[in-house]
Image (tube, grey):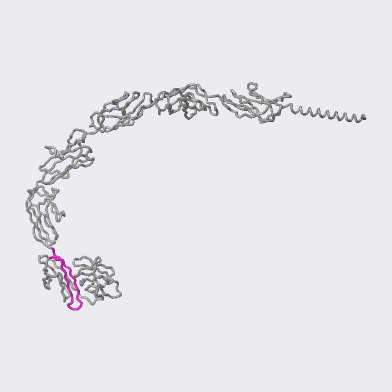
Amino acid sequence: MPKHILSSNLFKLYLFAFSIVLCTHTTFASQITPDNSIIVSSNESKLCLGEEAIISLSSTESGVRYQLKDNNSDSFVSNIIIGDNSAASFDPITPAANTSYIVVATHIASSESIDLNPNISIEVISLPNTSLNVSSSHNSLCVGESTSITIDNSETDVSYQIEGGANTSESSIFGNGTSLIIDNFEPFRSATYHINALREGCETIVPLTKDFDLDVRLPPETKLHIFSDKREICVGEKVLLSLSPSDPKADYQLLDGENLIGSKVTGNGGYIDLGVIKPDHTTTYSVDAKGHFCIDPVRVDFTFKVDVHHPAKIDRQLISNKTEVCEGEPFIISVLNSQEDVIYQLHDGTDFLDSQIIGNGNKANFPEIYPKNNTNYFVYGREMVCPYKLKLDNQIDINLIRTHDFPIENFATPGEICLGETLDIELPLTEKNITYHLYDNNISIESITSDGGPVIFEDLLAEVDSKYKVLIENCVDEVVAAEPQLEIHSTPQTNIIVTDEINGSDGKINVIVHEGKTPYSYIFENYKTIVSDEHFIELNGMKAGDYKLAVVDANSCKSTDTGHEIRIDFSNSKDYAVNGILTPNGDGRNDSWTINYTPEWDAPEVSIFNIYGQKVYHSNSYQNDWKGTFNSSRLPNGSYFYLIEFNRKDIKPVKGILSILGN
């Protein structure tokens, strides 16, 4: 081989070898220092003493050893991690104080080391103080009762919880920096209880070293019965109350409402006497039972009511429906505001009467009493339970009026009168201080109290049906002192219809009379007198002028003392005509009452009256349509009066007589 070729090949070999050496040197140099980009983290930056923390690496590098170093002690802790190009975590650590940790990475081949970032700082919180003093307000209590637990010098960031017994657990409560009181702790059994403490943010629960024992017992039985020798008493009497069955481990206290009665009594397993009481009012007694191990007493289920009765009150007022009683009349005594359950009995000053009543809370009435003499009545009251019969403060004094011997001689003056005339009624013999009351048909007229002489009721105006009697006013029942006999005659009543003169002597006077007794004497002054049994007369051919009429009946009763003034005027021909006959019999003639008048006039106002003056028909605008009815019934045949008003200044109201025939 030529030398230059060999030289060339050697050179190439040298270059290759150099490149290998160079390449090898480069690879070795890249692995001398560990990768410092790996991130270090911790799952906790703050934990409680005794709790664990885990420090982790985001990745690891092959050929590198990782160690966790405690900066406080400058010593390595936990395990060694050999990198394998994956994430890794150190074994859990339990720092005892605030500590800073750093991860040291060392290249195994070159022993080159670096500190990975960042440093990990962990704050360690101390556990709660377990040496606190614990006490309970009551070490002995009964089931259902509660006690208060006090923790001295509690810590503000620590919660405390009671545990003990058979898994007893209460809600936790935070400390307050001073004495902490857990109220209303209600244990259900006897046990040793302790307090667990947990600092806020921690998971480690530690018990306080001081325990407390609670002795929990069953409460006394409450379904007990109260007994007494009596349930109803009169005020001042005594009552003995007993209880059964009693508990030897309990004390019993008698109560009136919330007031303690007597002393406590310890049970004996059977009947116990709660003591003798002397109540002054109706009340219901109860009993509290307190077990020897209990904090508070409990109320026994059953109660006992004692009804306390009081003697009758003597200030009740007595009243009577009258103080003067006529002979043979009854009267009634009443007790106002009577007391219920009180028996009242009458006494007439000598003996008790049979009549008894029971009060009702209001006015109580005795049965009717018929006195035989002037008597003073008393009332005694006795409560049904109390044995005492007490006399009420006031009394009833009764004055008896003897009426059987009253004279009833009397007379009326005159004894026969016409209606409208006056009369006197006289009682010539009367009793002094007795009031005589005059009635007319039970209507009060006048009363006079006698001075012992005659009693006269004067100037009485009687009615046609008057019936007089004089009663003794002092009597409630009707006692007649006088009943005079009197005859009263009705007085003739007249209706006069005048038709004015038109031509010559054609005036007319129609007279209708009712009441009184026939025959009637129609006495016309300066004309003539007509005696007739008829209630209706008609005088024709009357001239215009003034007339006076008096009607006297068979009893000499006058229609008027002065006479009826009658005037017939002269009248020219009229613009109207009134039909004086109505025959509503359906024959087509005079079936309706008709009035004819000038067509330009308005319809007139019409009123129809019977002979007694009663209005039987009225129309404000008459249409010639009335058929002689009243209240849908036909009027009887007879004479009726009409009054027609044409509402014209030149026409006076027209009066006349209408005869209804044919019914």
The one of 350 and 276 positioned closer to us in this rendering: 276
Q: Looking at this view, is 358 or 651 the one in front?
A: 358
Q: Is residue 162 above or below residue 489?
A: above
Q: Quadrant of residue 303?
A: top left
Residue at 28% over, 27% down: 242
Q: Look at the picture and state if 74 lies above or below 316.
A: above
Residue at the limit of the structure toward the bottom, as seen here:
504
Quarter of the image where the N terminus is located: top right
Please say whether residue 13 is one of the residues in the magenta stretch.
Answer: no
Q: Position of residue 175 (x, y in %)?
A: 49, 27
Q: Position of residue 627 (x, y in %)?
A: 25, 70
Asked if residue 110 lies left or right of residue 88, the reply is right
Residue 257 in view: yes
Depth order, front residue of 28/431: 28
Task: Let me know if residue 577 appears in the view.
Answer: no
Where are the magenta residues, as a range? 490-516
Answer with left or right where residue 224 lies relative to residue 17: left
Foreground residue, 339 or 326? 339
Quarter of the image for residue 590 reads bottom left
Q: How many marks?
A: 0
